[in-house]
Amino acid sequence: ERGTFSHRHALVHDQKTGAKHTFVNHIEPGQEEFYVRNSFLSEYGVLGFELGYSMEHPDALVMWEAQFGDFVNGAQIIIDQFLSAGEAKWMRQSGLVMLLPHGYQGAGPEHSSCRIERFLQNSDEDPDVVPRDLDTLQGQIRAIQKNNWQIVNPTTPANYFHCLRRQLHREFRKPLIIPATKALLRHKLAVSPLEEFTGDTRFHRVIDE
């Protein structure tokens, strides 16, 4: 499939038979299905569909990935009018995940930025108020519930895993915006031991150097 960068191998085609194979659908018997679909270059239409699908299927992890982060330009109306303000205006929650490559690894200056400043400006978190009890899990959950969405830059595989996992395991839904550099896809230091994926491990808001 026409996936982006390291995601291109999510689904492969047999050149002789035309058969399709999705690797992550064969980890263990009885697991949930993973679907990956190519979409045409109408970000406005496709992101609107994914937003609606995430509302109708809150138990599904719905993800939209831009080939380059600046492709969100074509979907700005969906983001501003519906994704950022949908819960405040219509009391409709969405757990839609937006994967936006962000950094100077793009093919051209226009591809270097997902316009992260737009997402930060549309966040309804009060910059002058520090939420209480952020050192506790309940305090972190309470802080997220009060905001319109989450903007996260996970720098390790384990933190990325937990970031996606909690999208489904929470009792509420919030959009998740991930502006991440493609340089981390094969960076030698961007690794996590298996122990950080299992047991009592969870997402870390900040990772010390």
Image (tube, grey):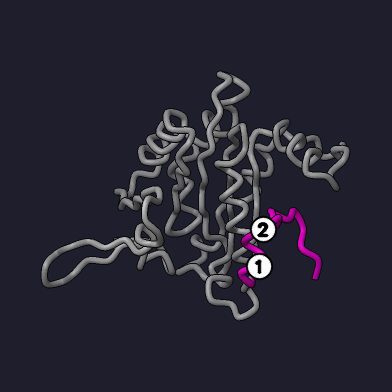
Task: In the displayed orientation, state which residue is furthest to the top.
Answer: 90
User: In whole angstroms, how far apart are the C-alphas of marks 1 and 2?
Assistant: 7 Å
> Number of marks in the image?
2
**Compared with residue 125, is residue 8 higher up or lower down, i.e. above or below?**
below
**Compared with residue 78, is residue 15 higher up or lower down, i.e. above or below?**
below
Amino acid on which disc 2 is placed:
Gly
Badge 1 density bin: few <14, some 14–19, many ≥20, Cα 10 Å: few
Q: Which mark is residue 199?
A: 2
Task: In the displayed orientation, state which residue is furthest to the front.
Answer: 29
- Residue at the location (40% across, 48% down)? 32
- Start and end of the magenta stretch? 193-209
**Compared with residue 107, is residue 198 higher up or lower down, i.e. above or below?**
above
Q: Is 92 within the magenta?
A: no
Tags 1 and 2 in contact by the CB under 8 Å rule?
yes
Amino acid on which disc 1 is placed:
Glu
| Image coordinates for residue 179, horizontal then vertical, percent | 59, 55
- Residue at the location (16% across, 71% down)? 15
Instruction: Name the one closer to the observer, 31 or 9.
Output: 31
| Image coordinates for residue 23, horizontal then vertical, percent | 35, 64
**Which quarter of the picture shows residue 206?**
bottom right
Which quarter of the image is occupied by the C terminus?
A: bottom right
| Image coordinates for residue 112, horizontal then vertical, percent | 54, 63
Q: Is 201 within the magenta?
A: yes
- Residue at the location (31% across, 51% down)? 37
**Compared with residue 111, is residue 116 higher up or lower down, i.e. above or below?**
above
Please give the residue where the numbered disc 1 appears in the rendered image.
195
SS at mark 2 in the image: loop
SS at mark 1 in the image: helix
Q: Which mark is residue 177?
A: none
